[in-house]
Amino acid sequence: MTDLLDRARGALHAQPFSMLLGAELMHAGPDELTLRLPVREELKQQHGFVHGGVISYLADNALTFAGALALGPRVVTGEYKINYLRPAISGTLVARARVVFAGRQQATCQCSVFVMENGDEHLVALAQGTVSRMGEAGGTNGGHGETTPPA
């Protein structure tokens, strides 16, 4: 499992945007993984809540990394839907994603995003999406959050 986690962390560190935000990969298992992102002032919107785009990024990346666990390292997000349930103000965002179903070319994954603060954990968003395997030449039927996690 340590090799899988190291490869996944290497893929995350190869994403400049993830490094800009400060995302960290905490766990990678056979069909699930956990990303975390400490809340900082510059990640908030005008009402003091973590910006929805930040939460959406975390869900998107976690979904894609989970899909890569089932499909291999060359995958992209085909689509996803997110429901925001409550605002996050401070603490640490934690995204837990898992593979629900995987075929040869696509995987359906789900992600729960929580905020952890003072030992308490609160659900802030739920997401579900489709992750697609990229073709040999890098082409796919669309795609957004490319990742190259564990092989």
Image: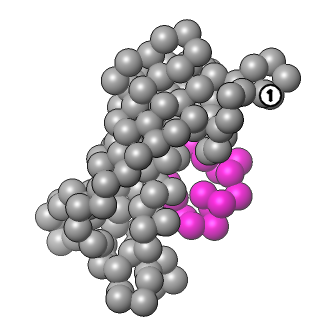
What crowding class fits label 1: few (fewer than 14 Cα within 10 Å), some (14-19), or many (20 or more)?
Answer: few
Magenta span includes 14: yes
- Can residue 101 be seen at all in this image of the molecule? yes
What kind of secondary structure does the magenta stretch mostly adopt? Answer: helix
Q: Residue 3 sits in which quadrant? A: top right
In-front residue for pair 19/83: 83
**What is the x, y in percent for residue 127?**
36, 45
Which residue is label 1 attached to?
138
Q: Residue 148 sits in which quadrant? A: top right
Q: Does residue 95 appear to the left or right of 142 in the view shown?
A: left
**What is the x, y in percent for residue 8?**
56, 36
Furthest toward the top, the residue is: 104
Furthest toward the left, the residue is: 120
**What is the x, y in percent for residue 84?**
30, 61
Q: What stretch is highlighted in magenta?
A: 9-24
The structure residue drawn at horizontal position 37% and vertical position 51%, both measured from the top left corner, is: 82
**What is the x, y in percent for residue 132?**
59, 26
Q: Does residue 133 appear to the left or right of 79 in the view shown?
A: right
In-front residue for pair 135/26: 135
The structure residue drawn at horizontal position 29% and vertical position 72%, both measured from the top left corner, is: 88
Does 119 sit above or below residue 39?
Answer: above
Image quadrant holding the N terminus, namely top left
Magenta span includes 61: no
Tag 1: residue type? Gly
Colour scheme shown: one colour
Q: Does residue 6 appear to the left or right of 54 in the view shown?
A: right
Q: Does residue 42 appear to the left or right of 140 in the view shown?
A: left
